[in-house]
Image: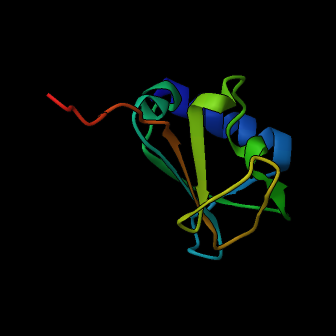
Amino acid sequence: MEAENVLITYLIKRFKFQLNKDYVAMVKIRYIGYIASIVGTSETNIKLEGSVRVYELLPVKDRERIIALVNGKPADWSDYVNDEDTVIFMPIIGGGGISTV
């Protein structure tokens, strides 16, 4: 829970985000797998004061290990996010090769 508060505090300070309490247009951010464990929550809703880039919503260094989806489609880290968008951050999953034995 403390990690969630740290991330939300960061987002509010950095981008003048507002937590949505009035059910107005907002960005829904979902975190899957180990990312949710690091952030401390699996979902948060934030009101933006304008467009921001995907990378601004998850300030991490190892982006090559994370997939970002915006409205269900793969997104580039430099794509813009607006209110009413849904952003999902999930780890890249690999493996599962076909055995010929």
Q: Is residue 5 left or right of residue 15?
A: left
Residue 47 image offset from top left, x and y in percent: 69, 62
Q: Residue at x 44, y 29 (%)?
A: 1
Q: Residue at x 69, y 27 (%)?
A: 60
Q: Is residue 101 left or right of residue 5?
A: left
Kindly indicate the quadrant of the structure image that contains residue 79: bottom right
Residue 21 image offset from top left, x and y in percent: 57, 65
Going by the picture, which residue comes out furthest to the left?
101
Q: Residue at x 64, y 68 (%)?
A: 26
The colour scheme used here is rainbow
Kindly indicate the quadrant of the structure image that contains residue 7: top right
Of the pair 18 and 82, the residue shown nearer to us: 82
The C terminus is located in which quarter? top left
- How many numbered dots are placed on residues in this image? 0
Residue 4 image offset from top left, x and y in percent: 53, 34
Q: Residue at x 45, y 35 (%)?
A: 36
Residue 80 image offset from top left, x and y in percent: 80, 61
Of the pair 17 and 27, the residue shown nearer to us: 27
Of the pair 70 and 15, the residue shown nearer to us: 70
Above or below residue 65? Residue 54 is below
Above or below residue 16? Residue 7 is above
Kindly indicate the quadrant of the structure image that contains residue 66: top right
Q: Is residue 55 left or right of residue 42?
A: right
Q: Is residue 46 left or right of residue 13?
A: left
Of the pair 26 and 86, the residue shown nearer to us: 86
